[in-house]
Amino acid sequence: MTSTLDETATTPTDGGVPELTHWIGGRATPGGSGIYGDVTNPATGEVSARVPFASAEEVLDAVAAARAAFPAWRDTSLARRTSILFRFRELLNARAGELAELITAEHGKVLSDAAGEVARGQEVVEFACGMPHLLKGGSTENASTGVDVHSVRQPLGVVGIISPFNFPAMVPMWFFPIAIAAGNTVVLKPSEKVPSAALWMAELWREAGLPDGVFNVVNGDKVAVDGLLTSPDVRSISFVGSTPIARYIYETGTAHGKRVQALGGAKNHMVVLPDADLDLAADQAVNAGFGSAGERCMAISALVAVGDCADTLVGKIAERARGLRTGDGRRSCDMGPLVTKAAQDRVSGYVDAGEREGATVVVDGRNGEFDADGQGFFVGPTLLDHVGTDMSVYTDEIFGPVLSVVRVDSYTEAVDLINANPYGNGTAIFTNDGGAARRFQNEVEVGMIGVNVPVPVPMAYYSFGGWKNSLFGDTHAHGTEGVHFFTRGKVITTRWLDPSHAGLNLGFPTNA
């Protein structure tokens, strides 16, 4: 099987740039709206493909395909559903490198980071392979005289997933393996900046034996998003992205009667106490601040240095940041480009603003030498010191390789600073004091906490999600909360006056 990028290059443009497709009802479907967006290689600035933007009618076609496939998929045995999921897992393990290359070509992150993204998404696939256990209900015999009660969980129907550009494979895999294993059918709207990973995974599902219509992909912009949000046949929406859009997704989806989990933005703090191992803290601040060019909702963007450790810590981070090699993610680099020219300009603009507002630019990534050909969208590692909480580099989610150091005098001041922030996605504390760490995890008002771990993304059997303006809706992604999100419960009370008799059958019972 060739890559999606090759297989869907059905109608080249005049310049030989391939056109991608949607994936509806088990097959690649060319766009019919006549509206396209450019897909670029961020390391070179070159247009690599054009992606069709779905019309409202094309979104309805995808929803209709998912709706038509739902009854049969819902009634397919758990054994059969999980066997297909296992096949998807094995195919993905065998070909993970292909998917990582697609991600690097469109997002820009280095290949090792892209491979890590695929691996983290695969963890949710493996978790969903245990769906027969996860869907087990409860039972009470003789709750009343001759009366038994039991509970079951059943799928919702057609579910929508709207995913961001920064994790083209992992974020969709936070949702669709659980949704599919539970018996739902899916319409995925990937970011128009990085569409090929979703189409590639659609083909992999077909190879794994997933019935047509169970997994669909529609590319596009707000028209596609609104089509999913307003369709009466879509029962739930899962979204990850910026806070303003997450709020819009939540409010619009719930107004149309949908169950919604909308994960929003973040301003993640890393507190370093004076007793911490400062070399470890510096290493991890660089890893968490500059990995994937800072385009992670769990990236550390604010380092809170407590007491007299600040000067030493800033010096150690600066030394490490200056040694990073930034360039084409397909080469031997530590950090790749930002996803678009607009993102590059936005991040550089924030650094400009921070400098004007009085922050000290310790390491400046706005200009430099980058290991790439062409005009890529690069900003190198950037370290700002003496950042005030009223500066835009602190108040806003920059989503780039900019690490801001805020200096405070005490542990209490650090916690108060975090708790006053409108975001509550992730945070970390670096210390060798177990009492301080235990107090921190109890007092801080954030959904995911790391102790000497800078990016506390939980394993798939726990759930991912923040507090405050980092989450709209009351259900987190994957883990048991994800299973509950994609199912709804029934309680059945029964009384049978006479025993039934099914006749003789000496064959070995099976679960087919």
Image: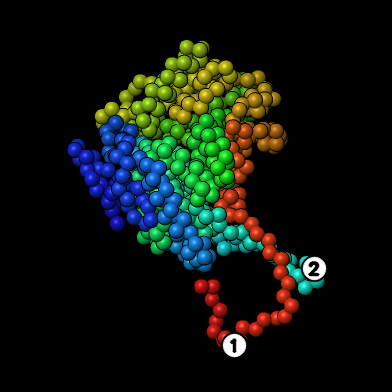
Q: Is residue 297 above or below residue 160?
A: above
Q: Residue at x 41, y 21 (%)?
A: 348
**Quadrant of the image for the N terminus?**
bottom left
Residue 478: give x, y in percent of width and height: 55, 49
Q: Which of 374 and 436 lies nearest the eye of the viewer?
A: 374
Q: What whole-number distance in Å separates the C-alpha atoms at marks 1 and 2?
A: 31 Å
Label of residue 144 in the image: 2
Residue 229: give x, y in percent of width and height: 50, 42
Element marked by disc 2: strand
Label tally: 2
- Please identify the quarter of the rendering in which residue 111 is found: top left
Residue 116 can be seen in this image: no
Residue 164 can be seen in this image: yes
Q: Is residue 216 above or below residue 138?
A: above
Residue 199: give x, y in percent of width and height: 36, 49
Residue type at mark 1?
Answer: Leu
Asked whether, in this view, residue 447 is left or right of residue 46, the answer is right
Q: Residues within 10 Å of mark 2 (few under 14, many from 20)?
A: few
Q: Residue at x 52, y 24 (%)?
A: 396
Disc 1: which residue: 504
Residue type at mark 2?
Answer: Ser
Residue 328: give x, y in percent of width and height: 32, 34
Element marked by disc 1: loop
Asked whether, in this view, residue 182 is left or right of residue 412, the answer is left
Q: Which label lies toward us, 1 or 2?
A: 2
Q: Residue at x 54, y 76 (%)?
A: 510
Q: Is residue 426 above or below residue 495?
A: above
